[in-house]
Every structure is written in structure tokens, then in C-alpha cells.
Image (cartoon, grey):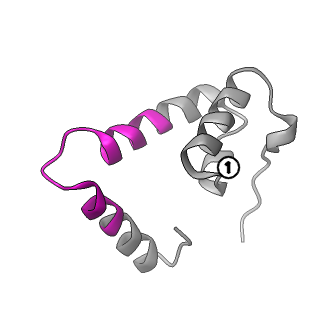
């Protein structure tokens, strides 16, 4: 398994702390997939923007359908969703 250095939520400052605070507001915690970009808060912010556009933006798919697709893809990739 790969090891990637990350910044823990309690050590976050500035833009990273804002991203972490938003993550906690969205889902109750900072997911591992969010903390993976903690060394580059600008990249994290861009990634979160794409996530929000895909999951919450205009789409022919309902919100629950998007979650279902994400869950199935994660399962197929043997990832915890």
C-alpha cells in the first residue's frame, strides 16, 4: 500500500483549514480522499469544485443516481466509498 504524507485536520491552517471545515460540514468528517491533497490546498480546492459540479450541478441524473454510480464504481475499484 502506498503512503502519502498528509496534514491532519487539527494541524490545518489557512485555505486548507477552510477546505477541511467545508468537508466536515458536508459529510461530518474529512474523508481520506480529501486529505490526500492536503499538501496542495489549491489543487484540493479545484478537485472539490469538480466534485461539487459533478455531484450537485445540473445533470440528467438525479442526485441519488449520481451517488449510486459513485458507489458502484468505488465497489468495482475495491475502494471504500
Q: Is residue 49 magenta?
A: yes
The residue pinned by badge 1 equals 30
* Crowd tier of the residue under label 1, counting other residues whose Cα lies within 10 Å: few below 14, some 14–19, many 20 or above: some
Q: 33 or 61, which lies in front?
A: 61
Q: Secondary structure at mark 1?
A: loop
Q: Seen in the image, is 3 located left or right of residue 37? A: right
Q: Residue at x 66, y 56 (%)?
A: 32
Q: Residue at x 58, y 35 (%)?
A: 44
Q: Seen in the image, is 23 located left or right of residue 68? A: right
Q: Residue at x 41, y 79 (%)?
A: 76
> From which residue to which does the magenta span run?
48-68
Q: Is residue 62 above or below residue 74?
A: above
Q: Looking at the picture, how far across and down is residue 70, in whole percent?
A: 37, 64
Q: Looking at the picture, how far across and down is residue 30, in whole percent?
A: 67, 49
Quadrant of the frame with the N terminus: bottom right
Q: Is residue 6 above or below residue 1?
A: above
Which residue extends farthest top? Answer: 14
Q: Seen in the image, is 19 located left or right of residue 71? A: right
Q: Is residue 16 magenta?
A: no
Q: Looking at the picture, how far across and down is residue 59, in whole percent?
A: 17, 45
Q: Looking at the picture, how far across and down is residue 42, in whole percent?
A: 59, 25
Q: Give residue 11's quadrant in the image.
A: top right
Which secondary structure dominates the residues rendered in magenta?
helix
Amino acid at each position: 500500500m502506498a503512503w502519502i504524507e498528509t496534514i491532519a485536520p487539527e494541524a490545518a491552517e489557512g485555505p486548507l483549514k477552510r477546505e477541511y471545515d467545508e468537508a466536515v460540514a458536508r459529510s461530518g468528517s474529512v474523508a481520506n480522499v480529501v486529505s490526500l491533497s492536503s499538501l496542495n490546498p489549491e489543487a484540493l480546492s479545484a478537485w472539490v469544485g469538480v466534485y461539487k459540479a459533478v455531484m450537485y450541478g445540473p445533470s440528467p441524473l438525479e442526485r441519488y443516481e449520481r451517488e449510486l454510480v459513485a458507489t458502484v464504481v468505488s465497489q468495482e475499484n475495491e475502494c471504500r466509498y
